[in-house]
Every structure is written in C-alpha cells, then in structure tokens.
Image: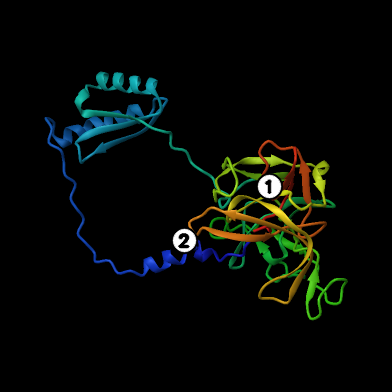
Amino acid sequence: MSRLNPLRLIVPAALVVVAACQDTITPTAPVAARVTPSAYAPQQVQRWFDLMAREGLALPGTVLADYDETTNRVVVGVEHAAARANMRALAARLGVPAEVLVIRQMEPIRLVQTLRDRVDPRIGGIQIHFGNFLCSMGFNAVDGTQASFVTASHCTNKQGGVEGTVYYQPLQSVDGVSIGTEVEDPPYRRNIAGCPHGKKCRTSDASRAAYNPGINSALGQLAKTAASSPNTGSIDLKGSITLTGADLRDHFSIGETINKVGRTTGWTQGTVTATCATVNVSGSNITQICQTIVENSVRSSVRETAVRPCTRRETRWPAYCGAATHPEHCWCSARSRTSRTSSDRCK
C-alpha cells in the first residue's frame, strides 16, 4: 500500500511520459470538417437525427445516436440484430431515408466504478485519503462495539503512535465528510527481541481507525476487481467477496501464492519466497520483524518488477483462509484452498 500524493495522480509513473510532456509542439489551426455531398441538406439531416435520437434512444438495445457531420449521415449504435431491425422500422415510420441512416452494432456503454471511486458501504481494498497522501483500506473490523477499519501504520500522519489521523474516501475534495479517525497504532520500540541496534521495531505495520457515526461499512467484505487474472493493473470494481471468522489463518509457507487488491495496482499475485524475515524499511530507522516476503510482477506501462513484503502472524494484519471461486484482496492460495489477507500493504 503506497503513500501517494493525490496531486500527482494525473501524471503516470513513467518518466518518459514526463519527458514527453516537456516537448514543444507548434500549435496548428483546427482542420474544418469536410461534409460529404448528398441529396439532402445538412439542416434536414440534423432534423432527422433529432427525431431518431428522441425516439430511438428510448428503445431497448440502443447504444447511441449521432449526427456525423463529415458524412452528413445519422449514425445509430445498437447492441444486437433485434435492435437493428427496430431502428430501421422506426426510421421508416419517421420518414428518414434509408440512405441517410447508418446503423452500427457495438458493445453497450457502461459506467465503471473503480477502487479509487467513492464506495458505499466501505469495503476492504478501496482508496482512502489522509493529509496529502492516498492509501488503501485494509479491512473492516469491530473492536468491542466500535465499528472500525484496519489500514497500514505508515498510512497515518506518523507511523507508530496515535495522532488522530483523519480519513476520507475516496478524496476529501470528492466527499468532504470524514469517514473515520485513527484510534489505535502501537508505537515502534527499541530493545525488543530481534530488533537491531539503533532501530525501532514492530512485528506489524497496522493501525485501526474508528468509523464516524453515519458511515456505512460492510464487515467481512473485500473489493473484487473485474480482472479475469491477476497482475493486469485493472482497478475496475466488480462487487466484493465475503470473509468470515472461520477464514482466519496466521501462517504462510514457502511457495504459496499470495494475492492482494488495492487502489494502486488492483489485483496482484505473487509467490512466498521467505517467511519470518526481519526487514529494514528503506529511508527510515524502522525494522519490521517476522515478515513474509512475496515476489510478483505487475504488467503496466512502466513494466516494473517489484518485491512486495507481505505478512505473517499479526504482522501488518491477519490473513484469511477459505475456498473462493474468484479470490481477491491480499490472500494466499495453496493446492485447492484459497486464503486471503485483507490489506494492500503487500504493494
């Protein structure tokens, strides 16, 4: 789960894109549309377009209607043959000449929700915003009677210790109502078992935030992407999967397959290459004790291969095991059974 500055979201990660944006391009005047001559005046064809759009878009299977000024034709998109027949019948009834009408079969246009959009109720794996950074929600939990969610300790204002970090979903600029506040994040300590000299250590990179009153959350629900396979980079949201307390597990083995879902790279998958490793966090004096290491490769425009730290025991957060037909959100699978951990920390 990476901390990202939301101001940089519009810029892809590849430096070549940044360099390309610095190229100077001489502005040119727009090219005027060339209208194909026909037996009908453009004004008349536009009136026919208005009629076809008004009535045609009300028919099932119609995708779009357009006046194509370059060909002086009315273009209608349909999903299937039955809709094509209905459109021709409508044109005949409205007096639209057949030679003016172009009907194209195409896929329907759908609104797509992503892991970076507002999701209600809130579920594990979706984007959260705090301060100047973005992270992924780990999973929902209840502490006593307090509805909560777990995320990474490094997804707080200060890693380790409670500072009352305030969270928004997906962005404060999109929804200014805070969803919750950090309430639990044990401090990193020195001189504990296994902690190197001069380092501060914990066996987890996890924190808990309490939901604010009126915020909906779905306990045991983790985001499910629309991807048919892992490591594609797709972040399109397609429902959720359900976990129960019976799925809880706290150990992974070398060679097991670990999956995760989060707002940056969607559903990714890798293989456990080390268990209970002591890991230094680059650029800090923090050491994480007893970590599971997972290696994976995510297909993207930057074509990068990365090593992702995962979890063991209470490290970062629990893991969940159980059967699943389409596993999601940092879970592991071995043989015929599938288990998932509910965090994007594996990024």
Disc 1 crowd, CA 10 A, few/some/many (<14, 14-19, 20+): some
Mark 1 or 2, closer to the camera: 2
Label at residue 264:
none
Whether tag 1 and tag 2 are in contact, CB under 8 A, the answer is no
Q: Which amino acid does label 1 sit on?
A: Asn
Dividing the image into 4 quarters, which one contains the C terminus? bottom right
What residue occupies the far right of the structure in this picture? 193
Q: Count up the numbered dots.
A: 2
Disc number placed over residue 10 in the picture, else none: 2
Q: In this view, does 170 lie to the left or right of 65?
A: right
What type is the residue that disc 2 sits on? Answer: Ile
The answer to whether 55 is drawn above or below residue 340 in the figure is above
Q: Relative to residue 313, is residue 232 depicted above or below? A: above
Reading the image, the residue beneath label 1 is: 216
Q: Is mark 2 on a helix, strand or loop?
A: loop
Q: Which residue is drawn at 74% across and 49% down?
A: 256
Front residue of this view, candidates 166 and 295: 295
State the CA–CA distance, disc 1 to disc 2.
29 Å
Describe residue 127's horizontal placement relative to residue 94 as left or right: right
Q: Which quadrant of the structure image shows residue 135?
A: bottom right
Give percent across and percent down for residue 190. 83, 77
Image quadrant assignment for residue 204: bottom right
The percent coordinates of residue 176 (x first, y second) are 58, 58
Q: Quadrant of the N terminus?
A: bottom right
Q: Earlier in the sequence, mark 1 or mark 2?
A: 2
Q: Residues within 10 Å of mark 2 (few under 14, many from 20)?
A: few
Question: Which residue lies at the image location 75% right of the left edge and 40% below the top edge?
Answer: 335
Q: How far across and how far down the image is residue 131, in percent?
A: 61, 67
